[in-house]
Image: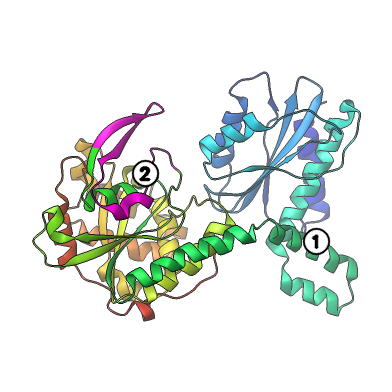
């Protein structure tokens, strides 16, 4: 059976017949066969490049010739998978998805491949046709989560459209019931501990896409001795002599995944790290954007971070941009600008307080940061030009890197020099007005 063509044809037929049910982009990728060692990884990389923004990817997967399963990937953004579902239609199947799940996490580190209940049959020879049916049904349900919500459900109830209302409520319940409420409340409690630690204090709040080096930078600024080490064949700059006890909850990793679960505070005495400024400052590490763990973390941090910083005396926003962020044509910077704009909706009013640190740049590229940013600015698409927050941040980066840019080397640089420079930079003096609670997407 040519499952790829059949699935694509059926999808096109449904899109033409029911355009409102399939209004978002859906792509069918070529089937993966388990006897091709790199097939699954290749398809996952292809999924990242296929389309952009919110979209659904359908992938048939063949096991030992006869047994077919289906995998659905629901992308929330260009790079972030919101949902990864595995559908095995064979009753009493002994297939283990562990290998698929592990390879998925290598490319999308915070994504879990989840089993989902689907129509099943004892005859493995029926698995191809049932997989096609299951994938199309799942794609339609995902479309409903995009298009339908509580408002639509209310209208259906008022119109006594019971079947439509029931369908919507089932989908909403499925979305909500996947939350681990106990874990959610635990994370909020942990974030709340920081509220009292930083109340009426001056803080530096670090923003950055996951993997930009926030935790590494905080270790460096707090006085940890940094060395280059090899972790699982990856080069990594790691703290080897940690002097500040507040750093026990700040962990680093060479992988593009967030090690920080909730906002944490590290108090640094300026004199202890060779700075000339009097007193102390609190460095606040928060979970990376663009690759967070799960919905529980997003919700807890949407509450915890804003609640914490609203009680501060002042906030210095420090934005970390890695070489990879720039090489990605600033797609990561766009995502970061949106993420910063969520708790700080009037970003233009506070952009002058932003301080930029560039990380993981090769030595021969450190002097070209302004040039790289200028090239990106000259090549913006019409859509990017209309992206207000992104343009505000990019323009500010261009102005502040015109003469020089701070490209951090955690092994050779002196933390005191950078902290003195940060101490003299502008701060948000009324964080209770600048930061607002928001709904985590």
Quarter of the image with the C terminus is: bottom right
* Distance CA(mark 1)–CA(mark 2): 40 Å
Q: Please provide percent x and percent y for residue 208.
A: 37, 54
Question: What residue span does the magenta drawing correspond to?
Answer: 227-256
From the viewer's side, name the closer residue of 269 and 98: 269
Q: Is residue 345 left or right of residue 107?
A: left
Q: Is residue 230 magenta?
A: yes
Q: Is residue 203 above or below residue 119?
A: below
Task: Answer yes or no: is residue 135 visible.
Answer: yes
Specify the label residue 170 is tagged with: 1
Q: How is the image coloured?
A: rainbow
- SS type, badge 1: helix
Q: Please provide percent x and percent y for residue 67.
A: 80, 26
Q: Is residue 4 magenta?
A: no
Residue annotated with mark 2:
252
Q: Is residue 137 above or below residue 284?
A: above
As drawn, the residue found furthest toward the front would be 245
Q: Of marks 1 and 2, which one's residue comes earlier in the chain?
A: 1
Q: Is residue 350 left or right of residue 77?
A: left
Q: Quadrant of residue 195?
A: bottom left
As drawn, the residue found furthest toward the left would be 276
Question: Local crowd at mark 2 within 10 Å, few (<14), some, or many (≥20)?
Answer: many
Q: Please provide percent x and percent y for residue 183.
A: 58, 58
Asked if labels 2 and 1 touch by Cβ distance under 8 angstroms, the answer is no
Question: Local crowd at mark 1 within 10 Å, few (<14), some, or many (≥20)?
Answer: few
Q: Quadrant of residue 180?
A: bottom right
Q: Please provide percent x and percent y for residue 143.
A: 72, 56
From the viewer's side, name the closer residue of 333 and 286: 286
Q: Residue at 75% x, 28% y: name it.
A: 95
């Amino acid at each position: 059976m040519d499952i790829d063509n059949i699935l694509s044809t059926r999808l096109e037929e449904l899109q033409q017949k029911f355009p409102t049910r399939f209004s978002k982009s859906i792509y069918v990728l070529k089937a993966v066969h388990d006897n091709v060692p790199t097939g699954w990884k290749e398809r996952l990389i292809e999924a990242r490049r296929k389309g952009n923004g919110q979209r659904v990817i359908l992938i048939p997967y063949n096991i030992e010739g006869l047994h077919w399963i289906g995998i659905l990937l629901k992308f929330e953004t260009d790079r972030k998978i919101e949902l990864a579902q595995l559908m095995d239609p064979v009753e009493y199947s002994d297939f283990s998805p562990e290998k698929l799940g592990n390879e998925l996490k290598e490319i999308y580190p915070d994504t879990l491949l989840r089993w989902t209940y689907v129509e099943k049959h004892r005859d493995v020879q029926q698995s191809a046709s049932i997989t096609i049916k299951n994938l199309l049904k799942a794609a339609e349900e995902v479309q409903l989560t995009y298009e339908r919500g509580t408002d639509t459900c209310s209208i259906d109830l008022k119109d006594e459209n019971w079947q439509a209302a029931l369908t919507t409520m089932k989908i909403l319940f499925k979305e909500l019931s996947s939350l681990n409420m106990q874990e959610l409340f635990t994370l909020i409690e942990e974030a709340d501990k920081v509220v009292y630690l930083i109340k009426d204090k001056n803080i530096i709040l670090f923003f950055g896409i996951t993997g930009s080096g926030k935790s590494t930078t905080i270790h460096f600024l707090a006085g940890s001795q940094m060395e280059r080490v090899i972790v699982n064949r990856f080069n990594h700059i790691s703290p080897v002599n940690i002097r500040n006890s507040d750093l026990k909850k700040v962990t680093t990793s060479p992988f593009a995944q967030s090690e920080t679960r909730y906002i944490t505070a590290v108090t640094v005495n300026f004199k202890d790290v060779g700075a000339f400024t009097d007193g102390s400052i609190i460095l606040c590490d928060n979970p990376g954007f663009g690759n967070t763990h799960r919905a529980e973390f997003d919700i807890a941090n949407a509450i915890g971070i804003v609640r914490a910083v609203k009680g501060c005396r002042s906030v210095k926003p420090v934005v970390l941009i890695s070489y990879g962020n720039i090489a990605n044509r600033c797609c990561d910077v766009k995502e970061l600008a949106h993420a910063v704009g969520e708790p700080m909706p009037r970003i233009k009013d506070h952009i002058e307080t932003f301080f930029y640190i560039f990380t993981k740049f090769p030595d021969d590229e450190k002097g070209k940061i302004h040039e790289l940013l200028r090239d990106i600015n000259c090549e913006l698409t019409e859509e990017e030009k209309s992206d207000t927050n992104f343009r505000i941040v990019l323009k500010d980066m261009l102005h502040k890197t015109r003469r020089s840019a701070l490209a951090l080397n955690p092994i050779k640089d002196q933390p005191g020099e950078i902290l003195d420079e940060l101490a003299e930079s502008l701060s948000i003096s009324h964080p209770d007005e600048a930061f607002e609670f928001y709904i985590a997407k």
